[in-house]
Image (cartoon, rainbow, N blue to C red):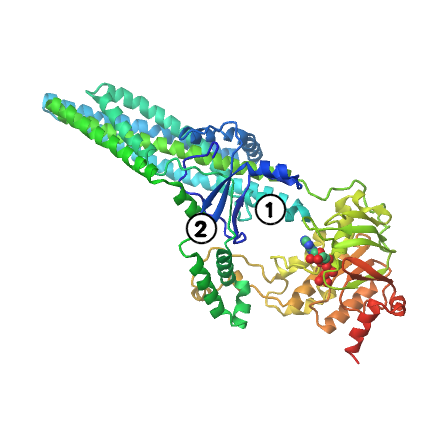
Amino acid sequence: MGGGCSGIKRLPAPRLNAHPAKMSTRLHPKSEKRALGDNDSTKRKSDLAKEFKHIKAGIWDVYEQIPHSKFSIDIPWISGLTHNLEIVEDLPFFWRMLKDVTKIKWFWYHLSLFILVKILSSLLPAVALWFTSHYLTVIRVAMDERRLDKELLIFASTGRICCTAFEAFLKYLEEQLQVPLDLIMKEHLDKVVVNVKASLDVPTFDDRVVKGRLESATGGGGGPDSSSAWGSISIMISLFASAARLLTGFGVLAKVIGSQQDGVYFAILHLGQELSKVFLEPGWGFPRAYAWVAITDNKHYVKLSGLEQLVRNSEHKQEIVAGNLAESIKGAHNQAYNHVSGKCAPWYTMLSSSRRSALQYLAYTLAPKSVEEWAEVAYLLKSAAHPETIPTCLATIRLVQETNRGFIGELWTIFYQARSIREKFHQIRELYEIQEIQNKVPDGKISFPEDSHSLASGITVEFRNVSFRYPGKADFALRDVSFKIDKGQLCVIVGTNGSGKSTMLKLILRLYDPTEGTIFVNGHNIKTLKLFDLRESMAVLFQDYTHFPLTVKDNIALGDPQNAHDETRVREAARLGGAEEFIDKMSEGFDTNAKTESGMQIDRDLFREAIGRVGNEDTVKLSGGQLQRLAVSRMFMRAVLSGEERVGLLLFDEPSAALDPTAEHDLFSRIRKLRGEKTMIFSSHRIGQLTKPADLILYMDDSKVLESGTHIELMAEGGKYAELWNLQAQAFL
Ligand SMILES: Nc1ncnc2c1ncn2[C@@H]1O[C@H](COP(=O)(O)OP(=O)(O)OP(=O)(O)O)[C@@H](O)[C@H]1O
């Protein structure tokens, strides 16, 4: 690999929430940006392919991205060090983060204390070494004058003990200071990530490349990896502290051993021995790319992983039990294993084993041993030549050994820190770069509505020759759709599954822009209107509405965040949505599901008995119909209670699919009352209650509007709508 980054023995484990056949994907943002504009040019594809090194590891095809760094030099050992210089490119982002966090209250105070503690800690080993050097004087005096210098001995030993105690105290202070600093950074980055994620629109958020960037920047867990943020600063400080410790220690050692017989000789010999252990250790130098993808299309492995996911996820449990699937799953799992047994280790295990040749291994193991042997022999030869110096020699050797070990430890720390600092800096860069992701649906410039009363009786909606394909899809979800609805009218879209009904609603909301054609509201091309204003003027109930992981109250209140605090409004919305009654029956009412817990590996029964509290495993499970009532309440909160003029268009996608007949009847009668005040568009399979009074019915099939008109007109036409009406009416005959 060009300029491979060396030094880490093992590739990190992949995040297992990915598709089993694509276990890990982390691409460098630069290449992602390149990929964004890539259409279908073959040459471009082959150029891009050259950026990846392919390695076959068992059943895996691993592709490592070749870094584009001006600092990369493809020489073993050197490449690893030069690769660290890449942080120069990431430094501006680190600087930006520093500028951001330093605006936070208390950050400087804690940071200054932390730096002070680090400076003191870095000087301490040199002081301890200075005390230790007095032992040599004690031995020399004992040898030359045959007496023990007790005072010096006590001074040296007390000094060393004090150093150790002070070191422990500083260590304690360091740990105490890390906590608030880490938290400050985490809070800051949490806000960055939430801001970015909340601002992205649907096609951008769904984009595979954007998803990869978000996952990579946030460490996969959703939130930012705070250890990278604070870690990058703390490592920078530690790096300087380690360098200071090395220099001061080296200065004291040079002074001490320079005055000892053979001191320099022993120091060099021992340093060589220790260094060889570090640098020639097996495994040092195995490269690691920070961008890679591992793919397997081994169908047995894919099945194996799929089955393992099936039994792991609790959402499938009920179907496994109800369908008596346990035995078949076990059998299929065994069968799949028979095909890939011995070959299905995770890709990073397969990769690391495939990279080491026997010769490399032998060389790495033999080299440090030889240096060690050679050093031992040299000690022996020197001692044999001058037996009278053995006692002083032994004391010097001990001092040298002790100090050298400290040095090596320090050197090792510097190498390790320099290595991980690159990763941490890189992650900060990724975190800041995600803020620059551009939404795919561009904002308009014109404010909407023109005046605060213009939405009072609804909004006009017009589709003119609209066609639409979902991003990355070849088939059209809508083809050449044209229709117009006037203010305050009721429009119902009916038709077959997958004919494009929901898609029409999504286009009105500008979740996506049409591939061809134009949509107008109140005579404006919707692309020209400010997105916020446009969406503010509409309320939607999606078919695939979701229950927010919040309290019942918040689930409704978020329909109109400006009035979220108004409990009377929330209750009224719940009443209109038919949810008030069941919410009141729940023991915690509107506060149901207000708990959160994490990491509690405890005996729950014992905990409940002892403490009397329960965690979120006891959150109330709501039925499908109850969840839909909550979603309807949320819509009422926004559409009806947020103020007459704010919302002029209501969009309903199968609003009653999970409701019982009474709830459906109640809902439709409430909605019908809004006629004339709001324009309403329904996508529904149920015809009758809604289609009969509708001003416009659109019958859709295969992405096209096949029929349009009122109920009377379409029945007279005797087409598909009439067929459907008669089919449903027969059920009641
Ligand atoms: N996010 C998406 N990405 C890609 N394709 C999609 C997406 N959503 C829908 N489609 C496809 O677009 C077509 C129209 O889907 P749409 O959801 O609009 O149909 P529908 O008429 O509302 O169906 P149903 O009656 O089942 O709700 C379908 O072929 C569907 O597979």
The percent coordinates of residue 643 (x first, y second) are: 79, 54
Quadrant placement of the C terminus: bottom right
Indicate which disc residue 318 carries: none
The percent coordinates of residue 75 (x first, y second) are: 42, 29
- Secondary structure category for the residue under label 2: loop
Q: Which amino acid does label 1 sit on?
A: Lys
Residue 66 visible from this viewpoint: yes
Residue farthest bottom in this picture: 733
Residue farthest top in this picture: 259
The percent coordinates of residue 444 (x first, y second) are: 77, 41
Neighbour tally class for label 2: few under 14, some 14-19, many 20 plus, Cα within 10 Å: some
Q: Which of 563 and 62 is in front in this view?
A: 62
Is the residue 135 above or below the residue 484 in the image? above
- Secondary structure category for the residue under label 1: helix
Q: Does residue 494 appear left or right of residue 42 in this picture?
A: right
Indicate which disc residue 211 carries: 1
- Between marks 2 and 1, how big is the CA–CA gap? 23 Å
